[in-house]
Amino acid sequence: MRTATTTAPSLDPSTSASLGLRRIPKGQRLTGEAAVRFAADVINAYETKSIRRICEETGRSYGAIHRLLTTSGVTMRPKGPNGHQRQASANSADVS
């Protein structure tokens, strides 16, 4: 009888496989060059990923990632998949 053997992929626990973002242990503060590098990585990831996805990958809270992006001057996308459509229809309501 043949038994199947599987090996778990070897992942470095300090990085995430999907976005390449570093996972920060809970309670750890980033300072100096590490903070600058982390901010740049998060900003790059936000070009294609949601804040919630970035939170999952880094272990940081939604508020921490949102604050990092806004204080860095990043233009935030509208909430939800149809954010622009909802805003446009709410703003252009005919009040006759």
Image (tube, rainbow, N blue to C red):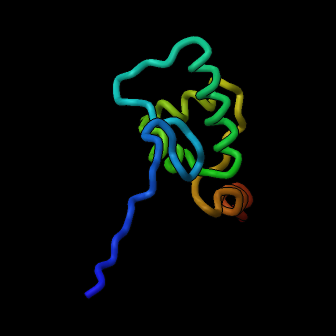
- Tell me the quadrant of the picture where the N terminus can be found: bottom left
Using the image as rendered, state which of residue 84 and residue 27 is in the foreground: 27
Residue drawn 49% across the image and 18% down it: 30
Query: At which x and y percent is residue 40?
Result: 67, 30
User: Would you identify the image quadrant in which residue 72 lies?
Assistant: top right
Relative vertical location of residue 84 with respect to residue 31 in this rendering, above or below: below
Outermost front residue: 1
Quadrant in the rendering for residue 84 = bottom right
Q: Is residue 47 above or below residue 73?
A: below
Residue at the image position 43 percent from the left and 18 percent from the top = 29
Name the residue furthest top.
32
- Residue 86's place in the image compared with 46, above or below, is below
Residue 95 sits in which quadrant?
Answer: bottom right
Up-down relation of residue 4 to residue 41 (above or below): below
Give percent across and percent down for residue 2: 30, 84
Give x and y (percent) for residue 87.
Answer: 67, 55
Query: Looking at the image, how many numbered discs can be counted on the residues?
Result: 0
Q: Tell me which residue sits at (58%, 11%) in the image.
A: 32
Quarter of the image where the C terminus is located = bottom right
The residue at the point 64 percent across, 63 percent down is 82
Q: Residue furthest left?
A: 1
Relative horizontal placement of residue 89, taking residue 34 as reference (left or right): right
Camera-nearest residue between 3 and 24: 3
Percent x, y for residue 52?
49, 48
Query: In the picture provided, is 94 more to the left or to the right than 41?
Result: right
